[in-house]
């Protein structure tokens, strides 16, 4: 049976609290063997969309695209299941934060990814919602220095230097959020990485070092943007961030330290939930008929709610396409 509504119409109806022709879903992943160049990234994203016909596309660039123009270096993986190897970081000492200026030495990688947005929009047409991935400035800073432990050490040693760099990172990604919209994205997929979590910093620290930049970058995408707030990690601050000005929320709902999908409707207001696919559990390790059964149970509980099926994070590339096909067929 043909779908009655386009992907965009279906997503809009769900966000309005209406009941469309079927449930919506999207899944995203890395393509390590193709994402080191823009043509390969675009090809991989389009092939994945063509195969499964997801209801929106979270453009999933290589995670390091945020920091390569400042000097981070990697050895590219040519294997689908192997991460790229990090070999050098732009920040090695406290004084290196002074180099993280409002304009990086190069801007080629970010510009290339805007080209990818344009190419994907042209290929997919107007009916598929597209969201481009942007990390929070704390997350970008962690990539620049190599680890969260090192970033916390530098904050303790010279917070002024790091905060100045965070401000410059935020300025760049405020502009970049606008550039993504101009390139054809409908919004941004804004990921807090490990920082909006009590396992990394206190919420009081996050209110000072994270939230102001989050709000600025999300606002820069525009009031009507289809922005997704992705609150990563265990013991996350999803409840505290429920007032963020976004229309869609995504997090790892199967982590027992985080709110589950049934409880969040009590505090998220009219936001739309993207969750329900257990990417660490049955989506990865189950069989297609088991996945069909799990989705049927969730559909019964989520009927009539502002709910879209999605994973808690980028899925492992090892997850079989037969399992993903079971998701799509179950809608």
Image (cartoon, rainbow, N blue to C red):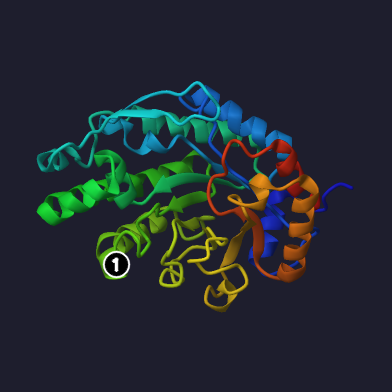
Residue 5 appears anywhere in the view: no
In percent of the image, x 64 and y 45: which residue is there?
284
Identify the residue at horizontal 55%, vertical 54% (top origin). 312
Q: Is residue 72 visible?
A: yes
Please state if 68 lies on the left or on the right of 32 as rendered. Answer: left
Q: Position of residue 66 (x, y in %)?
A: 35, 38
Image quarter of residue 269: bottom right
Most foreground residue, 283 or 90: 283
Q: Residue at x 10, y 40 (%)?
A: 95
Question: x and y percent of residue 148 in the render?
Answer: 28, 49
Above or below for 11 versus 116: below
Describe residue 1's horizontal placement relative to residue 321 as left or right: right
Q: Is 174 situated above or below 66?
A: below
- At 58% from the left and 43% from the top, the residue drawn is 28
Position of 130 with respect to 206 (left or right) is: right
The residue furthest right is: 1
Residue that extends furthest to the bottom in the rendered view of this protein: 266
In this rendered view, identify the residue nearer to me: 288 or 51. Answer: 288
On the image, the x and y values in percent for residue 134 come to 42, 46
Query: Compared with residue 124, is residue 74 higher up or lower down, i.e. above or below?
Result: above
């Amino acid at each position: 049976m043909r779908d009655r509504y386009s992907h965009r119409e279906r997503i809009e109806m769900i966000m309005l609290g209406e009941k469309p022709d079927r449930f919506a879903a999207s899944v995203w992943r890395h393509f390590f063997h193709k994402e080191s160049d823009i043509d390969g990234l675009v090809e991989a994203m389009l092939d994945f969309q063509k195969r499964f016909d997801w209801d929106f596309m979270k453009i999933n660039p290589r995670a390091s695209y945020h920091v390569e123009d400042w000097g981070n270096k990697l050895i590219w993986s040519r294997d689908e299941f192997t991460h790229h190897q990090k070999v050098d970081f732009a920040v090695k000492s406290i004084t290196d934060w002074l180099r993280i200026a409002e304009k990086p030495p190069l801007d080629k990688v970010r510009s290339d990814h805007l080209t990818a947005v344009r190419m994907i929009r042209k290929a997919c047409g107007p009916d598929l919602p597209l969201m481009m991935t942007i990390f929070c400035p704390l997350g970008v800073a962690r990539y620049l220095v190599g680890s969260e432990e090192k970033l916390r050490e530098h904050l303790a040693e010279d917070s002024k230097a790091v905060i100045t760099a965070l401000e410059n990172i935020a300025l760049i990604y405020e502009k970049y959020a606008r550039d993504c919209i101009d390139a054809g994205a409908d919004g941004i997929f804004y990921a807090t990485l490990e920082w909006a979590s009590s396992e990394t910093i206190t919420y009081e620290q996050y209110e000072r070092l994270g939230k102001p930049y989050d709000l600025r970058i999300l606002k820069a995408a525009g009031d009507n943007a289809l922005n997704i707030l992705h609150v990563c990690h265990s013991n996350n601050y999803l409840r505290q961030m429920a007032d963020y000005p976004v229309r869609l929320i995504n997090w790892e709902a199967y982590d027992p330290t985080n709110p589950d999908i049934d409880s969040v409707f009590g505090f998220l207001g009219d936001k739309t939930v993207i969750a329900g696919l257990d990417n660490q559990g049955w989506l990865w390790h189950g069989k297609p008929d088991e996945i069909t059964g799990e989705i049927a149970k969730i559909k019964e509980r989520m009927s009539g709610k502002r709910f879209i099926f999605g994973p808690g994070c980028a899925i492992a590339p090892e997850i079989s396409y037969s399992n993903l096909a079971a998701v799509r067929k179950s809608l």
